Image: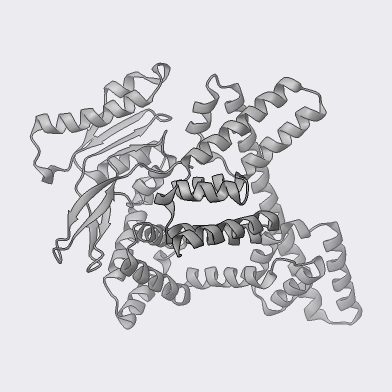
Amino acid sequence: MSTPRYQSAPITCPNCGHRFVSPVLTLIDVGQDPQAKSLFLSGQVNVAICPQCGHGGALSTPVVYHDPGKELLLTYVPPNLNLPEPEQQRIIGDLTGRVMSSLPPEKRKGYLLRPRSFFTLDSMIEAVLEADGITPEMLNAQREKAALLERLLRSPDPEVREILVGQNDSLIDYEFFQLLGVNLQMAQAQGQDQAVQQLALLQQQLLGWTTTGQEIAARQQAIQELGTEISREGLLDKLETAAMAGDQTRIETMVAVARPLVDYLFYQQLAGHIEQAEQAGDLDRTAKLKALRETILEVTDAIDAEMEKAGEEAAGLLQEIVDSDDLEQAVRDRLALMDEVFMSVLASNIEAAEQAGRAADVQRLQEVGNVLMKVIQESQPAVIQFINHLLTAEYPEGTQALLEQNGALLDPELLEVMDMIHEDLVENEREELARRLSQIRKQAEDLILP
């Protein structure tokens, strides 16, 4: 996924007068930066939080929104900037010109010559959502959640906040937690430590105070309880314990996480438990185990149906890319839709083509994979690209030379990112690569912290 192309703008906090620099995004091009769309729609672009006092708010900046897939070119200039008409036209012209120049000639269509102007940012967002089939009712619900989040952040007193949460329990759903999570990620990315602390505290409070939060916490606990090396027997024991306690959330979560273990052998073992309970005359256990079996069947059927649908969509997406004239542009246009399911479908198609001896299909599909990896690597932050280069360089001479040649990237943040990647490698049982990264990290640490 590509990274939105931010610029830096000087800001003076209206609350305390502190001056600081904040990222702004004036051109939101969904074709180039798919991630920018979700940030824009959730109100997470052109928002600044003062590092001095924690005061936050929207910035007044011109915005051009472009979605080539839906043929949308929208413009907005904040009225409070009081810009003369010629200056407004110049700014919008520069931004739309960047859109035009980024497209190959065959992609330049008539809608680019007729941008739609908006007097408010809300009306611009509504136009984007309308093109996505989002109803006004859905939009109003999102606004209510955003307003509630702001009220909660302005009410730091725990007692007052808990009362407010209790009055709005139904509004604090999974979407609300996603909105809170996006705000937390943005504050972390901008280095706003005070805002990060406030948002993290609110998140922890909501996990305990709300119906949805308690469900999320229960699911997290169920996942942790499963561990990383659960067996069929262990899974069945944990599910039976949850069934006896009537904990439906734990049952559904464990089945979803451990779906590969729920197979014919698993059902045989469950049938054995049911038979054992019947022979012992334990009517309560028998009934609960039979209800457990029905729940497991329902959950697995739903998961399988969802995976089948995702596989069909991924196969269709792959076919669109394979049939395209410009492979790289097709990948870039659809990058936001490519996930682990897509990668799995791509791999299985390559394997099937190889087994069938279709050399031309194998070559085309491998080209898709190569282009996808290239685009992903290009879109990664500089520090991630640097670590990838280090992992492919010869150790220790080659890695040492790379580290010394890239002094600008040698800082404590590099070590933190290395630690995060190392943890991920260990969790995915890629011990050799994790060991290699540990060696390189020691080299970097010696240069950063001599």
> Residue placed at 74% from the left, 66% from the top?
229
Which residue in the rendered view is the most extreme toward the right? Answer: 279
Percent across and percent down for residue 301 are: 71, 53
Label total for image: 0
Q: Is residue 140 visible?
A: yes
The answer to whether residue 381 shows anywhere in this view is no
Q: Is residue 217 above or below residue 368?
A: below
- Asked whether 121 or 211 is in front, the reply is 121
Residue 112 shown left or right of residue 52 in the figure: right
Residue 383, x across and y down, in percent: 46, 50
Residue 74 image-quadrant placement:
top left
Q: Residue at x 42, y 51 (%)?
A: 407
Residue, x 50% and y 45% (percent of image)? 385
Residue at 41% across / 30% down in the picture? Answer: 70
Name the one closer to the observer, 421 or 63: 421
Examine the rendered structure and indicate whether residue 352 appears above or below residue 385.
Answer: above
Q: Residue furthest top?
A: 106
Q: Quadrant of residue 292?
A: bottom right
Q: Position of residue 396 (x, y in %)?
A: 61, 52
Q: Is residue 187 above or below residue 328?
A: below
Q: Is residue 258 above or below residue 67?
A: below
Q: Is residue 379 left or right of residue 113?
A: right
Nearest to the observer: residue 289 or residue 153 = 153
Where residue 361 appears, x then y in whole percent? Answer: 71, 23
